[in-house]
Image: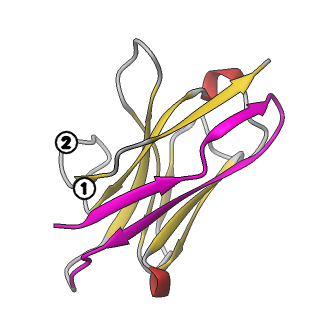
């Protein structure tokens, strides 16, 4: 099973940027991609972005499209989430997921990293 470790969260003002990282260990030849999800207090976890390990296929939720970018470094087994033009509603704990689906019902999960956007 893939082990994941997120980092890069923190406190940022609205309009600012953050880059999250997720290092994956234990990948196998069948590993196909990574995704980011987030969960705000009192809300359900939601899909944010996903990418194949080749980077040739990416998906974004409508709420982050145009502001966030998911980038994979297959050689380092690391996936990044570049978050620009942050809004207070982006405040959440962000989780990376390996080899799951966009519904968040499968795959391996990291421990999460907290992002707080102040207005």
- Residue at image x 21%, y 81%? 28
Residue 104 to residue 100: above or below:
above
Tell me, yes or no, whether the two marked residues, 2 and 1, touch with CB atoms within 8 Å.
Answer: yes
Tell me the magenta residue range: 1-28
Q: Give the x, y percent position of residue 13.
A: 81, 29
User: Mostly what secondary structure, the magenta segment?
Assistant: strand
Q: Mark 2 points at which residue?
A: 105
Q: How far apart are marks 2 and 1 (CA)?
A: 7 Å
The residue tagged with tag 1: helix, strand or loop?
Answer: loop
Coloration mode: secondary structure
Instruction: Give neighbour class at mark 2: few <14, some 14-19, many 20+ (Cα, 10 Å).
Output: few
Residue 119 to residue 64: above or below:
above
Q: Give the x, y percent position of residue 73.
A: 52, 78
Asked whether residue 96 appears in the rendered view, the answer is yes
The residue tagged with tag 2: helix, strand or loop?
Answer: loop
Instruction: Give neighbour class at mark 1: few <14, some 14-19, many 20+ (Cα, 10 Å).
Output: some
Q: Residue 34: which quarter of the image?
A: bottom left
Q: Residue 85: which quarter of the image?
A: top right
Foreground pick, 52 / 26: 26
- Residue at image x 31%, y 73%? 25
The mark nearer the N terminus, 2 or 1, is: 1
- Residue at image x 76%, y 34%? 12
Foreground pick, 62 / 113: 113
Q: Give the x, y percent position of residue 118.
A: 75, 21
Q: Does the magenta stretch include residue 19?
A: yes
Q: How many marks?
A: 2
* Number of the label disc, if any, that sits on residue 100: 1
């Amino acid at each position: 099973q893939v082990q994941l470790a997120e980092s890069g969260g923190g406190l940022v003002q609205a309009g600012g940027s953050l880059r999250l990282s997720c290092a994956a260990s234990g990948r196998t030849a069948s590993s196909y991609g990574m995704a980011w999800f987030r969960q705000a207090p009192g809300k359900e976890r939601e899909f944010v972005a996903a990418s194949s390990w080749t980077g040739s296929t990416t998906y974004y939720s409508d709420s982050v499209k145009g502001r966030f970018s998911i980038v994979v470094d297959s050689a380092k087994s690391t996936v990044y989430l570049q978050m620009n033009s942050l809004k207070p509603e982006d405040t959440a704990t962000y989780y990376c997921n390996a080899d799951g689906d966009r519904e968040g019902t499968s795959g391996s999960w990291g421990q999460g990293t907290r992002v707080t956007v102040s207005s």
